Structures are given as C-alpha cells and as structure tokens.
Amino acid sequence: MSTCIVTGGAGFVGSHLCDHLLARGHHVICIDNLDTGSLRNIDHIESDRFQFLNLDVTEKVWIEEDVDFVYHLASPASPIDYLRLPLQTLKVGAQGTWHMLGVAKFKRARFLLASTSEVYGDPQVHPQPEEYWGNVNPIGPRGVYDEAKRYAEALTMAYHRQQGVDTAIVRIFNTYGPRMRPHDGRAVPTFLRQALLGQDLTVFGDGSQTRSFCYVDDLVEGLIGLAESEEHLPVNIGNPDEFTLKELAEKVIEATGADSGIVYEPLPTDDPQVRRPDITRAREILDWEPSTALEDGLAKTVELSGVDGLVGRAD
C-alpha cells in the first residue's frame, strides 16, 4: 500500500482520483484550499485510509507521513475560475508546484504534474503531439492559465534534471463527468445545465471549433498509469475522438431528451479553433486509451449526477 498526496483533491478530477486510489488500497492525503473544490465532492468517502487537509499549496506544506506519490492537480481549471482568480492561478502554477516538488524531493516520492492541453494554445499543428511547442498568447486573458502550466512544466523538468526528483507530466485534454460544477463555464456542464432547464444551448462562434471529450474515469486510469510508470517527458491523456461544439450540443440534447434549440454568441478571445490529442505515446508507453464513447459518458454523467446536481440546485 502506497501513500499518495492529491493536491486539488476536492475538485472535479481530484476527487475521482482519490476514489480510484482508495479503491486500489492506497492511503490518500487530500489537500485543497476549497477555492474551486468542494467538500461535497469527498463527503461520500468513509475510509480510515483517507485524510483531508485544508491547505493552500502556495504556502509551504509540511507532511508528517512517508509519501510515495504526489499527484499535483491544484489549480483553477475553467475559464471562469482563472479569469476570476488570475493571480492565484499564476501563484499555484509557480509557488504551488515549487512547494509540492519540494515535498516530493524530501519524501523521495514520484511526482506527477497535472498540466493541460492549453499549453498548446490555439494550435497550428493538428492533432497535437507532445513534441509540439504550442501557439500561446502570453498576455491574453487565457495567458494566466496557459503560462502557469507551461512554467510548471519547466519547473518540474528542472527539478528532475538538476535535483534528481522522479517526475512525470500529464497534459490533460477536455474531461467531463459527475461532479463538474454546473456554472464552471465549460461546454459539457453548461450544455447539460441548459438542456435540463429547458433553455437553448449557447454555442460560441459558429460551432465549428472542435474539441475532444474524455470521460473522467478513463482520464484517472491514465493518470495513475503514468504515475506508476518510469516516464518523465510529457504525455497527452485525452480522447482522440473529435467533435465540433455544435455536434456536442446536439448530443447533449439527445442524451437529455430536451426540447432545446441552439443559439450562437461571439467567440471569446484566444479561444482555440481545434483541440485533439495525439495519444500515440500514451498507447505505446502506458498501453492506455479511453474506452468510453461520448454518448455513453454523457448518459453516465446525467445518471450519476442527477438533475439537481447538474443544474446547481441544493441537495
């Protein structure tokens, strides 16, 4: 049994990661300052192998226990959050990553950085392989998130190369599933909330921009597989099946049985036109690829979340 730290562990992806690690028999130390996470995401956990610490990783973190793995997921991740918390986003990418790399170094633990497909910006190479350096506007409104993650990747590799820390970097592509916040601004929860409320679905631009959507359970299996591997260079984890935003809206309407239309609004600044992972490295190194089709994942999200959870009504 290993002891795993999960920063951002009360968030959407982090809470699912805690569940999967506990199911595998590990001890889990969940760290979150609840800026964007919620205790509701972990209040179902009843295990003496689980510990929650309300800490801000931009401050120095001290852990008494021996630690085998550090999963560093802490960061605002949706446009609404990082535009609302720009300085905190930059700080957690820089100081938070620095502090948690220090924990991994002191504990001689394997360190996994949760990076993002946003490091590719509005890509000029499609699909995006890990070797692509990206097309990012560092001073645009999305730059606080993009550059925080790009810096975190550089810091992680510096700790590996100079300090000998055992590190891994995962670039996470669009992920969805139960526990996404209904008002976090991302496409899947927004469309589901609007459809279940009988509203028209809001698509930005003409809806031709593309994304790929990975169900959260598939993603978490990829995260654990990478953490337990010996790989140090970045690995894309996401679903290579590509859909336009208009197609996604239509699939959400079908999944919910809603009588909704689609309305179009202006495209946000620096919004990527295409986004699709090249997962060749994940297949070769981890023997990983997603197994959940979008239609099935949307149905599971609706079933497991319930209408109240998806529209934001109190439990």
Image: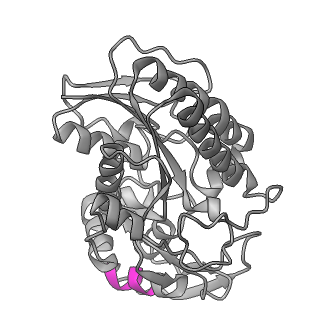
Direction from residue 43 to residue 114 in the image, left or right: right
Taking the spot 37% from the left edge, 63% from the top edge, the residue there is 282
> Can residue 133 be spotted in the picture?
yes
Direction from residue 180 to residue 265 in the image, left or right: right
State how many labels appear. Answer: 0
Q: How is the image coloured?
A: one colour
* In magenta stretch: residue 251: yes
Front residue of this view, candidates 154 and 54: 154
Horizontal and vertical percent position of residue 179: 38, 52
Taking the spot 51% from the left edge, 67% from the top edge, the residue there is 190
Q: Chief secondary structure of the magenta span?
A: helix
* In magenta stretch: residue 96: no
Front residue of this view, candidates 180 and 22: 22
> Can residue 56 be spotted in the picture?
no
Front residue of this view, candidates 44 and 126: 126
Direction from residue 150 to residue 195 in the image, left or right: left
Direction from residue 153 to residue 194 in the image, left or right: left
Horizontal and vertical percent position of residue 195: 44, 76
Q: Quadrant of the N terminus?
A: top left
- Vertical arrangement, residue 191 with respect to residue 136, above or below: below
Horizontal and vertical percent position of residue 124: 68, 78
Query: In the image as oriented, which residue stretches furthest toward the right?
Result: 139
Horizontal and vertical percent position of residue 79: 64, 57
- When asked about the image quadrant of residue 230, the answer is top left
- When asked about the image quadrant of residue 112, the answer is top left
- When asked about the image quadrant of residue 108, the answer is top left
Taking the spot 35% from the left edge, 58% from the top edge, the residue there is 219
Magenta-drawn segment: 250-255
Front residue of this view, candidates 217 and 248: 217
